[in-house]
Amino acid sequence: MTPSLMQNTAPGDTPAQTRLIDLVFPGDTNHHGTLFGGAGFALMDRIAFIAATRHGRVPFVTASCDRIDFRAPARIGQLVELVARPVRAGRRSLTVEVEMVAEDLIGGARHLCTRGSFAMVAMPEGKTPDWRLPAIPAEAPESAGGELRMTDIVFADQANSFGKMFGGDALAAMTKAAFVVASRRSRTITVLASSRRIDFKHPIAVGSIIDVIAKIVQTGRSSMTVAVELWSETLLEGSRQLTARGEFVMVSVDPDGRRVAQAPAS
């Protein structure tokens, strides 16, 4: 197994950007084969909530949305990448800007689908009367070396009767990250050929933020080995721990499922 892709982050550390990546499946689209506006809006609100909570470490609610512009559709089979940035903090209100970009996994073309601004209001129960939100942090640098980082939150329908995330849902998140990073590297159809040892180190509670971090660590003629780590983060305290890690072998194939050689990395 490769060394840890990311070091443990101390409570209170606040990324300037939060990134959610998903794929457009038929169940999320209308009869034109494009992503429902409501489904896109739900993703935007979700990532705005995560970004706000990471900034303030208190419960937040969505107060309003300021002009959501739908500029272009996202289609079945495309990847959608949402980036949220806190841009303005008041005493208890936070403005979060969100952009959603669609990407063709084979060709690599990208276009802006939607942009909007969300007004999030903090609900700081148990805080002193003079409590206020922290200032907006400086922009964080982008990950280097082809590393992919995807953020999401664990909901009740992903958990067992003990309120912990199903192992299968954790594996699905890790496999999705491996698929995205391998598809972006090869710009071919990629499929999962095998998974190597998967270590589950800690359970993940409902309401936790998860960060999935993936990086290609080995390439062959038609295959790529992707190391993936799954980190969990408590919503309000911000404490983080490595909860799972594994390696996935992804293979480039043609439309008939036959292995194809990858183009050299640019």
Image (cartoon, grey):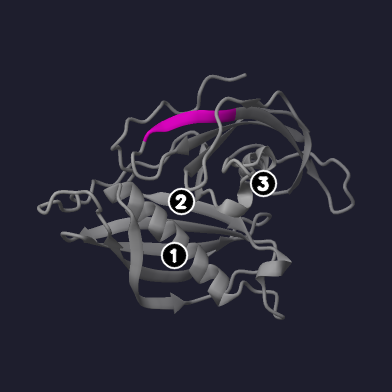
* Of the two numbered discs 3 and 1 in the rendering, the one whose residue sits closer to the viewer: 1
Q: Nearer the viewer, residue 104 or 23?
A: 23
Disc 3 element: helix
Q: Amino acid at mark 2?
A: Arg
Q: CA distance from mark 2 to mark 3?
A: 18 Å
- Residue occupied by mark 2: 19
- Camera-side residue of 35 and 185: 35
Q: Find out whether the residues at labels 1 and 2 contact each other: C-beta distance under 8 Å.
A: no
As drawn, 59 above or below 232: below
Residue 187 falls left or right of residue 57? right
- Image location of residue 36, percent across then percent down: 60, 75
State which region is magenta.
Answer: 239-244
Is 87 on the left-hand or right-hand side of 131? right
Give the number of the disc on residue 45.
1
Q: Amino acid at mark 1?
A: Asp
Residue receiving disc 3 = 183
Lower sequence index among marks 3 and 1 = 1
The spot of residue 175 in percent (x, y) is 67, 41
